[in-house]
Structures are given as structure tokens and as C-alpha cells.
Image (tube, grey):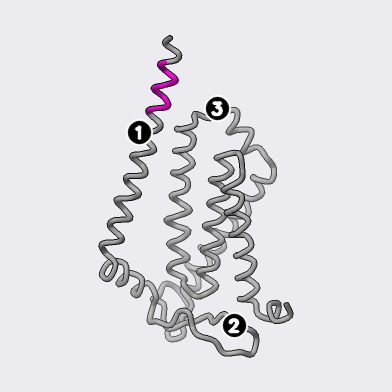
């Protein structure tokens, strides 16, 4: 354990990993669907932190922008499908712990955004001020004093990820988008069936 505390990156990896596991368990076992969706957002943020620790800055950014944003849509779908009452939602958000958690997340995102605009992406070749393309950078996850393999070693992993996604794996990427569209349509159909049953019972 001494080696873990001597290496900040390894310590952050275990912290984010613990939050990730705890959030995932909360998503599965929490009885409230809205709380489960919020915990899923926390899980995605923890996963983005792990990506950042191992040096995949672009993937971490996309994790926050795409997945954490998409979960907000999931919350809306849950509200529509389960027909939760307004007082139940108000009671959920009035919990002091959730207010503090939202405030902490907003402050952290603000700090990261301001730092990104002022300092730019870490770069060994160019000036760190302002916007710039990422150069060769690496964050080896090893014990203190040991040499390890570099998880990211490229002239900007944004170009590497983009090339792999839209050239090498274009067909799987499009298939995944169709699968997500089918899931949305399935949720709408199931919701309409439930609403039809409730309205039919009311008419009788």
C-alpha cells in the first residue's frame, strides 16, 4: 500500500475505480429509478476519470459529453414511462446530500473548463497557453521508481480515435447507432402500451 500512496496516478486510479464500482452497484440495487439514473451519471464520470488517469484525454472528454449528457435523456424517459408525480420528484431533489453533490459536480466541471481554456491540453512541443493540438504525452501507471508501458503515445489521440472509429470500425459504429435507435423506439412502444392499459381501465 505504500507504493500506492507514493504514486498519485495509481491512487487516483483506485479512487475512481472504487467510485465506479459503488456507483454501478447503486444503479442496480437502488429502488428509485431516478436515483439509479443519477448514480449512472456518477459512474460515467468515474469512468472518465480513469480514462484521464491513463492518458486518454479525448476519450475521457467524450465520456462526459456524450454518455453523461445522454443519461439526462434517460432520466426524461424514466419520468415519462413511469409517470412519476411531481411531488415525488420534488421530494427527491430536496434531499440536502443531492444538492451538495450537484454543487460539487458543477464546481469541478467549471474548474476543468476554465483550466482547459487557459492552459490548453498538456503538450511537450508547443506553448501550453490557449488552444493547441495535443502532442506526444504519456501517463504511465506504475509503481514509484519503476518503468512501465505507455498507455497513450501518439501525436494527439484525437486523430487516432477518429481514424479508428470512422475508418477501421465504421460499420460497427453505425450498427451501434441503429441499436440505440431501436432501443429508443422500443421504450416508446412499451410506454404507449402501459398508457393504453391504464386509460382502458379508467374508461371501464
Q: Specify the label residue 199 is tagged with.
A: none
In the picture, measured across the screen, residue 137 lies left or right of residue 32, that is left
**Nearer the camera: disc 2 or disc 3:** 2
Circle 3 — which element? loop
Of the image marks 1 and 2, the number of the one nearer the N terminus: 2
**Nearer the camera: disc 1 or disc 3:** 1
Q: Quadrant of residue 90?
A: top right
Residue 74, given in percent of the width and then of the height, sits at: 46, 43
Q: Which residue is mark 2?
A: 142
What is the quadrant of the N terminus in the image?
Answer: bottom right
Residue 175 against residue 185 in the figure, above or below = below
**Nearer the camera: disc 1 or disc 2:** 1
Residue 126, given in percent of the width and then of the height, sits at: 42, 83
In three-dimensional space, the C-alpha distance between marks 1 and 2, rounded to whole angstroms, equals 50 Å
Q: Which residues are magenta?
A: 193-200
Circle 2 — which element? loop
Q: Specify the label residue 85 is tagged with.
A: 3
Circle 1 — which element? helix
Of the image marks 2 and 3, the number of the one nearer the N terminus: 3
Residue lying at 39% horizontally and 77% vertically, measured from the top left:
156
Residue 84 against residue 58 in the figure, above or below = above
In three-dimensional space, the C-alpha distance between marks 2 and 3, rounded to whole angstroms, equals 50 Å
Residue 157, given in percent of the width and then of the height, sits at: 39, 75
Q: Residue furthest right?
A: 2
Residue 76, given in percent of the width and then of the height, sits at: 46, 38
Q: Specify the label residue 189 is tagged with.
A: 1
Residue lying at 57% horizontally and 48% vertically, measured from the top left:
27
Amino acid at each position: 500500500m505504500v507504493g500506492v500512496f507514493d504514486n498519485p496516478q495509481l491512487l487516483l486510479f483506485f479512487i475512481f475505480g472504487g467510485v465506479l464500482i459503488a456507483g454501478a452497484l447503486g444503479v442496480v440495487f437502488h429502488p428509485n429509478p431516478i436515483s439509479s439514473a443519477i448514480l449512472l451519471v456518477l459512474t460515467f464520470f468515474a469512468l472518465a476519470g480513469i480514462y484521464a488517469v491513463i492518458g486518454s484525454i479525448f476519450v475521457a472528454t467524450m465520456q462526459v459529453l456524450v454518455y453523461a449528457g445522454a443519461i439526462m435523456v434517460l432520466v426524461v424517459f424514466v419520468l415519462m414511462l413511469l409517470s412519476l408525480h411531481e411531488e415525488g420528484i420534488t421530494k427527491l431533489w430536496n434531499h440536502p446530500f443531492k444538492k451538495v453533490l450537484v454543487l460539487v459536480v458543477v464546481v469541478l466541471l467549471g474548474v476543468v473548463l476554465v483550466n482547459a481554456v487557459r492552459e490548453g491540453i498538456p503538450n511537450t512541443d508547443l506553448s501550453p497557453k490557449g488552444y493547441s493540438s495535443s502532442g506526444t504525452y504519456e501517463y504511465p501507471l506504475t509503481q514509484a521508481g519503476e518503468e512501465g508501458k505507455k498507455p497513450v503515445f501518439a501525436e494527439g489521440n484525437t486523430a487516432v480515435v477518429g481514424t479508428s472509429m470512422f475508418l477501421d470500425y465504421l460499420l460497427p459504429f453505425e450498427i451501434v447507432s441503429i441499436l440505440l435507435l431501436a432501443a429508443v423506439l422500443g421504450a416508446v412502444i412499451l410506454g404507449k402500451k402501459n398508457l393504453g392499459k391504464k386509460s382502458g381501465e379508467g374508461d371501464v
